[in-house]
Image (spheres, grey):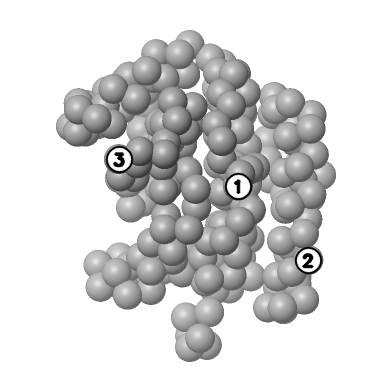
Amino acid sequence: MNADLRPSPQEVKNWMLSTLKHSCQVEYYSAKLNLDPKDPQRPHDIIGEGNKYSWPVIKGMAIQYRNNIPIFFEKYVLPSIELHRKSQYHHQMWNQQNSKATLEDMKLGAVDSLCSLLEDRKYQGGAHTFQQIINIIKKESPYKAKWFWMVYSSMKKILSPNTKQIQTLSNFPNIGLPIPMHNKIKKHTQKAVQILRKEQGYNL
């Protein structure tokens, strides 16, 4: 990888923290909604091929805020996004109509997408409120819209988790997750930090 494009330690840490917060948020809502998808790659987004803690994904996603030029995003960031979406079970079930997808798989896909819209993601136009999300859902295909509406009203009624409490990759607080899931997320996060230190030289 070109040294000039290699993510800085701070960029990697920022990406890891945003991923950690997203994983916790998705698993929080999944638990509150009593979802039981067949997804073998849980905790959400952080295990399995193409997970967001893996270097092939980190090296592109961590530098997404360096440059506003579209060609930079398309050349250096988008390949990492596409790798993640192609490799992860929940995207395989959600992104295209998949005959293998269960009801729970589709609900999880909707929860994941709604959580991402609530977060400050530049490539999605920044953070959205639940009210603003209504207009986005209305523009979706009828197939996906029905799943969005199925979980939207329930999610809106649930107390939002305080992901701002998560400020470190170690010993982060439990924001309302079932204890076993919180412990799993801690375990996989610690393992990812160790791998990044050993294989890429990042001391996070």
Tell me the residue that label 3 is attached to: 97
Residue 30 image position (x, y, % from top left): 57, 26
Q: Is residue 7 left or right of residue 182?
A: left
Q: Is residue 10 left or right of residue 137?
A: right
Q: Earlier in the sequence, mark 1 or mark 2?
A: 1
Query: SS for tag 1?
Result: loop
Q: Earlier in the sequence, mark 3 or mark 1?
A: 1
Mark-to-mark CA distance, 3 and 1 = 19 Å
- Numbered badge on residue 194: 2
Amino acid type at mark 3 = Gln
Q: Name above or below for residue 147 compared with residue 90.
A: above
Query: SS for tag 3?
Result: loop
Q: Residues within 10 Å of mark 3 (few under 14, many from 20)?
A: few
Residue 120 image position (x, y, % from top left): 43, 43
Q: In the picture, residue 171 is in which quadrant? A: top right
Which residue occupies the extreme front position in the image?
Answer: 99
Q: Residues within 10 Å of mark 1 (few under 14, many from 20)?
A: some
- Numbered badge on residue 41: 1
Residue 62 visible in image:
no
